[in-house]
């Protein structure tokens, strides 16, 4: 059974992060440059939350705030559930579905190890299915 650690092995555990006083506009530029949908908000090594495209659209645009004057600390999500490298992909998929969220921070004890997205979970699920199909084909062809 595949686990969160397998996703981090494939994608790496590089964490794109900003400080809490970074402007929303700066964070958005960073996200656009890296083609990602979120940034972690860290105060030194301490995890504070995550700013996502959804946070931006719902907490800045819809409320008429300024992207240049609003710090990410005002709009970041702080209540995302945490997962660890030993949690299963199935558990994460269920959690994301139940909570209607797209990102999960990954912690080992109290140390931030990375972040996974719904996209990462789907890719890993597809990869697992492709591996299963390959094994079944090899098995079928070995008996001929």
Image (cartoon, rainbow, N blue to C red):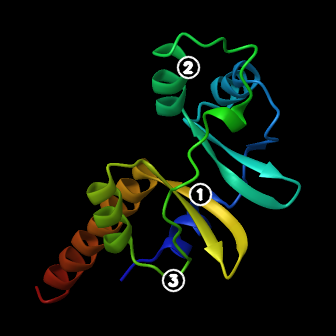
Of circles 3 and 2, the one toward us is: 2
Q: Position of residue 10 (x, y in %)?
A: 57, 63
Q: Which residue is mark 2?
A: 60
Q: Is label 1 in contact with label 3 (beta carbons under 8 Å)?
A: no
Specify which label sits upstream in the sequence, 1 or 3.
3
Q: Which mark identifies residue 16?
A: none
Q: Nearer the viewer, residue 9 or 132?
A: 9
For label 3, the crowd category at 10 Å Cα-Cα, with few meaning under 14, some 14 to 19 and many 20 or more, is few
For label 2, the crowd category at 10 Å Cα-Cα, with few meaning under 14, some 14 to 19 and many 20 or more, is some
Does 55 sit left or right of 21 as displayed?
left
SS for dot 3: loop
Q: Position of residue 54 (x, y in %)?
A: 46, 31
Of circles 1 and 2, the one toward us is: 2
Measured in 3D between alpha carbons, the distance from the residue under mark 1 to the one under mark 3, in whole angstroms, is 14 Å
User: In the displayed structure, would residue 6 be above or below residue 117?
Assistant: below
SS for dot 2: helix
Specify which label sits upstream in the sequence, 1 or 2.
2
User: In the displayed structure, would residue 103 be above or below residue 51?
Assistant: below
Q: Quadrant of residue 107?
A: bottom right
Does 14 sit left or right of 45 as displayed?
left
Measured in 3D between alpha carbons, the distance from the residue under mark 1 to the one under mark 2, in whole angstroms, is 23 Å
The total of numbered circles placed on residues is: 3
Does 106 sit left or right of 97 as displayed?
right
The residue under the point 73% across, 58% down is 47
Specify which label sits upstream in the sequence, 3 or 2.
2
Q: Which mark identifies residue 115?
A: 1
Q: Quadrant of residue 31?
A: top right
Q: Position of residue 39 (x, y in %)?
A: 66, 41
Q: Which residue is mark 3?
A: 86
The residue under the point 32% across, 63% down is 93
């Amino acid at each position: 059974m595949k686990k969160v650690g397998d996703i981090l092995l494939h994608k790496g555990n590089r964490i794109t992060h900003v400080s809490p006083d970074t402007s929303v506009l700066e964070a958005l530029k960073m996200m656009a440059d890296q083609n990602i949908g979120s940034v972690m908000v860290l105060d030194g090594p301490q995890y504070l939350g995550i700013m996502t495209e959804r946070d931006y659209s719902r907490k800045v645009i819809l409320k008429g705030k300024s992207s240049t004057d609003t710090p990410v600390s005002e709009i970041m999500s702080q209540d995302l559930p945490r997962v660890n490298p030993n949690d299963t992909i199935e558990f994460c998929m269920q959690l994301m579905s139940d909570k209607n969220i797209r990102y999960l921070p990954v912690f080992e004890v109290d140390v931030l190890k990375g972040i996974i997205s719904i996209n990462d979970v789907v890719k890993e699920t597809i990869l697992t299915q492709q591996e299963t199909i390959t094994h079944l084909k090899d098995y079928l062809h070995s008996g001929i």
